Amino acid sequence: MPVKDELARRRFEKLVDRLESLMRAALKPEYRGYYGQLILGDDDLAEMGELKDVRRAAREAGHRLGWKATTQLVGGRLFVLDEREVPEEIERLAGDAAAAAMDRAWQEGRRPRG
């Protein structure tokens, strides 16, 4: 039985490492580690194993990154979110970036097609 426990532990650690890597890659450097999120689709989840294990591993990976990680399953997708309080300057920076993206989208929508 101890061999099975050791295999399960190593498999879990490997999953945590993989999720941590994906979560780290999804971060925007200008937000200094805040506004972290990862979205895993059906195929990702099926490949990673049991949902409860993936959720637990995602929370552990988030802990390693300093996140207050939460998971939410919506329509077959698992959202891993950082729920920490965001410093005001980072919140302002993200708000400005979102407004600029909306302005670009609005401008592109007004251009004549042809």
Image: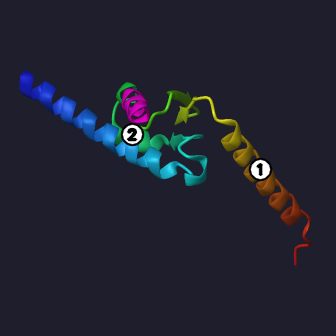
Question: Residue furthest toward the bottom?
Answer: 114
Give the left or right position of residue 67, taking residue 46 as reference. right
* Alpha carbon distance from label 2 to label 1: 37 Å
Residue 60 part of the magenta-drawn span: yes
What secondary structure do most residues of the magenta stretch adopt?
helix
Residue named by callout 2: 46
Looking at the picture, the colour scheme in use is rainbow
25 is higher (above) or lower (below) than 39? below
Percent x, y for residue 90? 66, 43
Residue 96 - label:
1
Q: Is residue 23 magenta?
A: no
Q: Is residue 77 visible?
A: no
Say which residue appears at 42% left-offset and 29% top-offset. 59
- What amino acid is at disc 1? Asp
Quarter in which the C terminus is drawn: bottom right
- Neighbour tally class for label 1: few under 14, some 14-19, many 20 plus, Cα within 10 Å: few
Q: Identity of the amino acid at label 2?
A: Ala
Q: Quadrant of the N terminus?
A: top left
110 sits to left or right of 6: right
| Res. 41 in view | yes
Q: Secondary structure at mark 1?
A: helix
Residue at left 53%, top 42%?
39
Q: Nearer the viewer, residue 38 or 34?
A: 34
Q: Position of residue 8 (x, y in %)?
A: 20, 30
Which of discs 2 and 1 lies nearer the camera? The answer is 1
Q: Position of residue 77 (x, y in %)?
A: 53, 37
**Magenta extent:** 54-64
Q: Residue at x 57, y 29 (%)?
A: 84
Q: Is residue 58 left or right of residue 91?
A: left
Q: Secondary structure at mark 2?
A: helix
